[in-house]
Amino acid sequence: MNLATTLRGTVFRFGSVKEVLAKANPPKSGDALAGIAARDAVERVAARVVLSNLSLAELRAHPVVPYEQDELTRLVEDSLDEEAYRAVAHLSVGQFREWLLETETRPDMIRSIGKGLTPEMAAATAKLMSNMDLMLAGAKCRVVVRANNTLGLPNRLSSRVQPNHPTDDVEGILLSAREGLSYGCGDAVIGVNPATDTAASTRQILEALHELTRKNAIPTQHCVLSHVTVQMQALQQGSPMDLMFQSLAGSEAANKAFGISIGLMDEAWEMMKDLGTTRGPNVMYFETGQGSALSSQAHHGADQVTMEARCYGFARRYQPFLLNTVVGFIGPEYLENGSQITRAALEDHFMGKLLGIPMGCDACFTYHAAMDQDELESLKVLLAASGCSYLMSLPVGDDIMLNYQSTSYHDIPSLRVLLDKRPTPEFDAWLCEQGILDGGRPGPRFGDPTVIR
């Protein structure tokens, strides 16, 4: 395995595959904070040259966290589809990138090899791609899943209605949810971040959302994003639950900081399949974000793009209905500005889809990041054009509980008109029945929350 190259008469030698992966990364404030970023643009190019010549087999043999030290590494290695792996193992990272971008490479071909890829392979490929490469390849990676409706079909753009309330006032949550539904949002999920992480609060919100969706025959899912152990308590107590949620990280140590493990998530998944209220078969919802492992000092010296890809290697065990990266929420310590947040969103979307995950994105920023509204709107267009399964939606794009800027209820229908996309088929039909949409355009009851009882 060759970890050296010569540029302009200067020899660049790297000590490990992990170092090559880190230094091939586009500039990220998180990698600089961790002290693993390339010193300058020339070293970054040298790392990419080395990376492009490494084979996918060499990446499999050198995970960024050793097999003996990490249960996620063991999970990925032990569950890899060997037949799919053998189809691409001989390719270099550069050759694999070229294959993905070839016009002859179809979505079904990419889907067939996804289970044979490790997260390190997906991350390595992303590092050799431009933003447009990530969009083109991401658009080819199609993942179709089903709960109470069907997500991920071509020419569709879904959204999560996020009707958060700073005191978990149920009537306030329901009012916000009705408004979002009246703009054609919410086909991915009506998902609430609770202010109080208790089984009682989780049950109260879930029961209200369940009543709303069933009374109006809305073909969507509901979820309360409390900790998975809290949701398990609520489920055992008889609470209706369409999707079970948890935030994931890319190492065993980082997941311990979240209070989870593979064993716990296995238990939650089995409980959800037995007691959940969705038709399924996909019943889980996850969130991730670049920098989470670094924030808990559990990144093992690996870069944040590679650690993010490992989240998807973890998530695919549970065949989730939803997974979104909360791309700008973690803050400027990890993604400093609009350029870095945009790049991370396109990376995450591509890597997740390549690994077989139905990727969405919370295109967002915190108020101390160097990003503005125009940059955020541009990112939403880029993601939707890339085939992103879903985005968030909330009143005026301003989350009054979590205090960050995201996607508004008005943005989703605007993106659909701009890019000629529709909601999930089941939700689309319901919107037309209610008069909210008329053939993909606003109908007579568009924006009228009183249509939802």
Image (cartoon, rainbow, N blue to C red):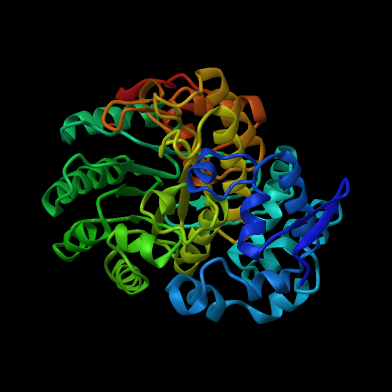
Answer left or right for 449 relative to 431: left
Query: Residue 158 location in percent, x, y?
Result: 51, 40
Answer left or right for 9 relative to 265: right
Dividing the image into 4 quarters, which one contains the N terminus?
A: bottom right
Instruction: Let me know if residue 440 appears in the view.
Output: no
Compare residues 253 and 268 and report the one nearer the observer.
253
Query: Furthest-front residue in view?
Result: 10
Q: How many marks?
A: 0
Residue drawn at (40%, 55%) of the image: 285
Answer left or right for 398 relative to 369: left
Compare residues 302 and 326 and report the one nearer the observer.
302
In the picture, residue 396 is in which quadrant? top left
Residue drawn at (61%, 68%) of the image: 118
Dividing the image into 4 quarters, which one contains the C terminus?
A: top left
Compare residues 74 and 378 and report the one nearer the observer.
74
Instruction: Let me know if residue 226 appears in the view.
Output: yes
Residue drawn at (51%, 29%) of the image: 412
Query: Residue 383 location in percent, x, y?
Result: 60, 37
Query: Residue 398 location in percent, x, y?
Result: 36, 24
Q: Is residue 164 above or below residue 77?
A: above
In the picture, residue 142 is in which quadrant? bottom right
